[in-house]
Image (cartoon, helix red, strand yellow):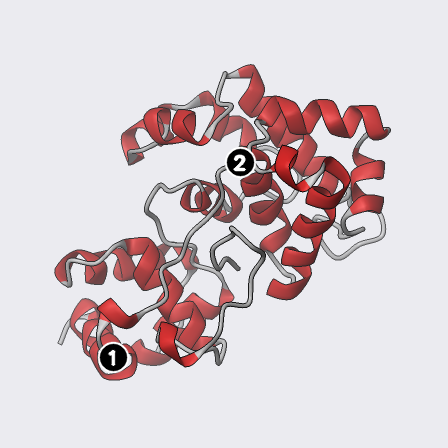
Amino acid sequence: MTDIDLLETAVSDDLGDHTRWFEPGGYSSVALCLIDSIYSTGNHYTGVIDAVRKYRERRGINASADDTASDLASAVKNWGGADALANTTKRWRCWPSTKAPYKADAVLRAAEILAAHRIETIDDVRERLGTPEQQDESPAKKEWLRLPGQRSGLTWTYFLMLAGVPGVKADRMVVRHVSRVLRRDVDPREAARIVSEVATRRNVSRTKLDHAIWRFESGRAVYIEAERPDHLPGQAHTR
């Protein structure tokens, strides 16, 4: 059996009927996608949701729901800059060092990159970054990957997913699951490729399969009827 065969069998055995899986969603706001995606790496899901909540509260829930990249950058600068955003949300670092910049700094700079390239809204993201070809040709992606702690591309991919562009966020849960099924170590790039291939075979969204694997591996319910929603009003499950 090929690696794809092995994972497809595991998906069938472990995850079952995909029509019962949670529907991963995102936000109607590029600003919220930015915060969630960049804060998500190396931190617990509930902490990320709390950071998003705190930004929403300071901005005003209704205002933040449609915040563009420019809205985020302008608001944070008015508050006093990236340090103020860190104090408002979480004082998390881009990597484990007291000398590392705050994730809030990466969020602000990512917002400035998107604004400079006129990628302001969810529609902009889907229209201009909706395909792998568009993403690879985008200067915004190249600039994002040069931000502190963002070189792997994991947060870039997750940002797109939260904005509704299908993808696989091969974080430690997904990599661990694929490695266990294949009985060998895989890196994030290989894990993403194999999950994507299985999604294509099973005619299911890559994002939906990625999310089901993550829920299963992290001990959460895979079927939506098995768990009450644990997210903010109007916000789909994220990680």
The reply to whether residue 44 is in sight is: no
Instruction: Name the residue rendered at 44%, 32% in the picture.
Output: 122
Q: Mark 2: which amino acid? A: Ser
Q: Nearer the viewer, residue 227 or 126?
A: 227
Q: Which quadrant of the rendered structure holds the N terminus?
A: bottom left
Is residue 236 visible in this depiction of the protein?
yes
Q: Provide the residue designation for mark 2.
A: 29
Residue type beneath disc 1: Ala
- Mark 1: give few (<14), some (14-19) or many (20+) Cα within 10 Å: some
Label 2 SS: loop
**Residue 191: where, in percent of width, then height?**
35, 61
Q: Is residue 208 left or right of residue 38?
A: left
Q: Is residue 92 left or right of residue 181?
A: right
Relative to residue 143, is residue 91 depicted above or below?
A: below
Q: Are marks 2 and 1 in contact (CB under 8 Å)?
A: no
Q: Residue at x 79, y 34 (%)?
A: 82
Q: Which residue is label 1 attached to?
A: 10
How far apart are the two marked residues, 2 and 1, measured between alpha carbons? 35 Å
